[in-house]
Image (tube, rainbow, N blue to C red):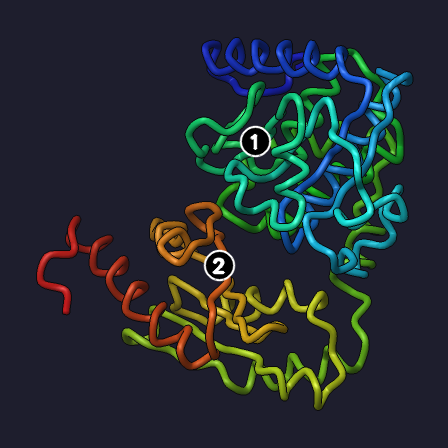
Amino acid sequence: MSSTELGPLDPKERECQKAGFELIARTLASARTIAICAHTSPDGDALGSQLAMVELVETLWPDAEVSALLADEQPAPHIYSFLPGFDRLMQPSTYDKDPDVFVALDLSDPRRLNKARTICERAGKVVVIDHHPPAEGFGDAKVVRTEAAAVGVIAAEFALYLGAELTPTMSQNLMCAIVTDTGRFQYQNANGEAFQVASLLVDHGASPSEISLNVYESFGLAFLHLKSLVLGRITTFEHGRIAYSYATQSDFDRTGANLDECDGLIDAVRSVEGSEVALFLKAVPGGKVRGNLRSKGPVDVSSVACSLGGGGHKAAAGFTFEGSVDEALVSVLPALRAILHEDENGDTEGIQ
């Protein structure tokens, strides 16, 4: 299969994506100022796709002024600082323009833009490229494919559609997006399309070993001490079907670990034998708790995250909770128990 044929295998889906790409390209071509932003608390897919898109847009439309915005005032996670273009990421408070086009990546709900949402609302047009269930009415031009393993997959196919060169730096960013959102190709979303695109990116200069070294194999002692606490606290519910652990603010203070190092802790909880759903809660500044959810099988954890104001995919989702770790667990655990029984019975009738 040639690189220009990568994408959805269903002809109708392929034509729909092409139509979306064409509208996005026309929207970008008419802009003088373009702001590109991903979701709050960005992960590897968000940042990798964003930085690749910045390079792509600047290459194809060199007269446009392109800015790489963060959704938060906090810096992006340091583990991704090896990505080409990382130093271009800027806090939303430093951006004072009304962009002609605002590109939202890895989100379909404007609430996940956090501090950058006001910039999006000032934009002339909004472009959305995502793989989460779409929010109605968000975006003037969009491609949203929930079956895509990562936004990096869609962004790579957008570059191919436009006939752009996949440079080594662009390929590295997109490879990081795919590797991290598929859990190093271990999650259920690691489909044939993801492997096809990843192969193409390696051929164009991406280095999976460098990504693995920086994201998964370069932890400080402070983080490893925190991880040992988290592992020692793993508890199971529902006869082992739910695995759970947590990290408190005092844990971070005592170990000196950083919040942005903790993305992989949910996978440690997920690894419990016999578990079907994993939950990891960590305290964050402001009296809040950030929750990560994972599913190993058919159980859809995104519905629980959405009920708490978050979002995500069927097998991987997250949310932010106002309150303590204990209060968050009290809210989340009954919902997780309910979806396990719903998956068994087809409905939640009789669940107490």
130, above or below 101, in the image: below
Quadrant of residue 18 within the rendered picture: top right
Percent across and percent down for residue 11 are: 48, 10
Find numbered disc 2 in the image and state the secondary structure of the residue it sits on: strand
Three-letter code for the amino acid on which mark 2 is drawn = Phe
Q: Residues within 10 Å of mark 2 (few under 14, many from 20)?
A: many
Percent across and percent down for residue 60 are: 85, 16
Q: Which residue is mark 1?
A: 192
Residue at x 57%, y 33% (from the top left corner): 130
160, above or below 155, in the image: above
Front-most of residues 323 and 97: 97
Q: Earlier in the sequence, mark 2 or mark 1?
A: 1
Front-most of residues 87 and 272: 87
Left or right of 146 on screen, residue 259: right
Of marks 2 and 1, the one in the foreground = 2
Front-most of residues 232 and 87: 87
Q: Quadrant of the C terminus?
A: bottom left
Residue at x 62%, y 25% (from the top left corner): 126
Q: Quadrant of the N terminus?
A: top right
Percent across and percent down for residue 318 are: 50, 57
Q: Which residue is mark 2?
A: 319
Q: Residues within 10 Å of mark 1 (few under 14, many from 20)?
A: few
Left or right of 213 on screen, residue 194: left
Quadrant of residue 150 within the rendered picture: top right
Percent across and percent down for residue 162 are: 75, 12
Three-letter code for the amino acid on which mark 1 is drawn = Gly
Find numbered disc 1 in the image and state the secondary structure of the residue it sits on: helix
Left or right of 308 on screen, residue 37: right
